[in-house]
Amino acid sequence: MVAVSRLIVRPSGPLQGEVTIGGAKNSALKLMAATLVAPGRHLLRNVPDIADVHTMSELLEAIGCTVRRREDDAIEIIRPEEVVPEAPADLVARMRASTAVLGPLLASAGRVRLPLPGGDDFGARPVDMHLTALEELGVTHEVVDGVIEARVDQLHGGECKLDYPSVGATENILMAAVRADGETTILNAAQEPEIWDLAAFLNRMGAHILGAGSRTITVTGVGELRAVEHSVIPDRIEAATYLAALGAAGGTITLRGADAGQLGVLIERLGSMGIRVAPEPGGLWATCEGRPRATDLQTLPYPGLATDHLPMLVAVLASADGTSFATENVFTGRFGYVAELARMGADISVEGHHLVVRGVDRLQGAEVRALDIRAGAAMVVAGLGAEGETVVTDAHHVDRGYAGFVEQLCGLGADVRRAVG
Ligand code: UD1
């Protein structure tokens, strides 16, 4: 049951103080799914306490695992010898990352029933590439009444050439190939940090994966894997969100636990907007004085600017000095948030997958909707720099991706509160 909640944001800044960057949502969810490849007791550390992690816990429990969250941000997952290789439809509908159980269930049970994930507010997000690649490993599938039924007697190695470096497809292939007979090569693999983290976790379990983080990954299948402990990498999208908040409200902040090594293009682009970011031991330091400058942005697969960074940056550019151009190359339908920013007085035109953002002097507070996790965070960012009160409805979307969002922003001196009911 999702509580109806709104975030009330008032003009804020200059921000000052420190936030703590938690474990990466997009990595933690896949590592949780990856525990399915090896029976026993796994321990994942630095797992954020967010709604999507709760959903993945429910999914693993439906599959037969025991999941327990500890006080210290760690999650213990006990994967039994026998699993139930079926994903309940309501959980897949709630969270697309549920598709990450496809590869590991094929590896551990030889079959899986997975309802087709729907689209979401940033367009259709198919799994065709996941399935085509798994066919190379011997998997057959059919879709019956909207449910993917996939099976394989024994996975075997193969060559999976992706038409696009899909993060989800690369992850599913990795989690299946670790248990295949022989060698699998993934060509045009995704290079996102979440892929390195998954490969590190699987290698700790005893897998043989080489080249994670590059375009070509080679996996030599092994007969058995064992349960292990692992710590999730820091969340680069959470870090980007607080840096965008700084751009909107000004100030000087420290992001404890952020990893500059994963944020190269973002830090460079923020620099072009006049927002200075520098690594320091254990995190990042950042400062923004005065009004940010317009810039040009385009999203690309890693190491390019992440598609998940763009909504928050556009929220800053909406009141930057000058006209910016932004291009979304990853999910081309991902501009729903632009109409919400327009309610706040933003002057943005959408031309196909391009945006022309004419910076206005100041946005005006309004009632706006959180359409998805990042769109919702972008509305909060916009509200920090706007005049008057901004009410962000459907705030449960934001809770899917951020632990203690309101508390962390308040800790920086921002005027944000939650209203429930
Ligand atoms: C993951 C992230 C998401 C991030 C995205 C890109 C999670 C839970 N989500 O999503 O936050 O924005 O990576 O960095 O980790 N595509 C197909 N067919 C497929 C698979 C993908 O056409 O079978 C297309 C998608 O529609 C999209 C592009 O490929 O246009 C990239 O998708 P992908 O990298 O797979 O993203 P996700 O893994 O879904």
Image (cartoon, rainbow, N blue to C red):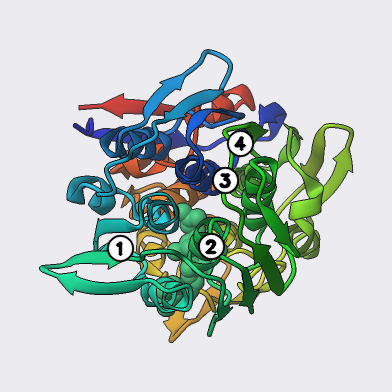
Q: In the picture provided, is 194 more to the left or to the right than 257?
A: left
Q: Amino acid at mark 1?
A: Asp
> Quick one: label 2, few (<14), some, or many (20+) residues within 10 Å?
many
Nearest to viewer (mark 4 / mark 2)? 2
Nearest to viewer (mark 3 / mark 4)? 3
319 over 20 or under it: above or below: below
Residue topped by disc 1: 120
- Whichever of labels 2 and 3 marks the residue nearer the N terminus, that label is 2
Residue topped by disc 2: 180
Residue 360 at least partly seen: no
**Residue at horizontal 31%, vertical 35%?**
6
Q: Amino acid at mark 3?
A: Glu
- Tell me: is circle 2 under 8 Å from ligand 1: no
**Residue at horizontal 54%, vertical 79%?**
329
Residue 30 at least partly seen: yes
Q: Amino acid at mark 2?
A: Ala
Nearest to viewer (mark 4 / mark 1)? 4
- Whichever of labels 4 and 1 marks the residue nearer the N terminus, that label is 4
What is the residue that sits farthest to the top in this orientation? 71
Marking on residue 23:
4
Q: Nearer the viewer, residue 48 or 28?
A: 28
- Whichever of labels 4 and 2 marks the residue nearer the N terminus, that label is 4
Q: Are marks 1 and 2 in contact (CB under 8 Å)?
A: no
Residue topped by disc 3: 224
Element type at marker 1? loop
User: Which x, y percent locates residue 419?
Assistant: 30, 27
Element type at marker 4? loop
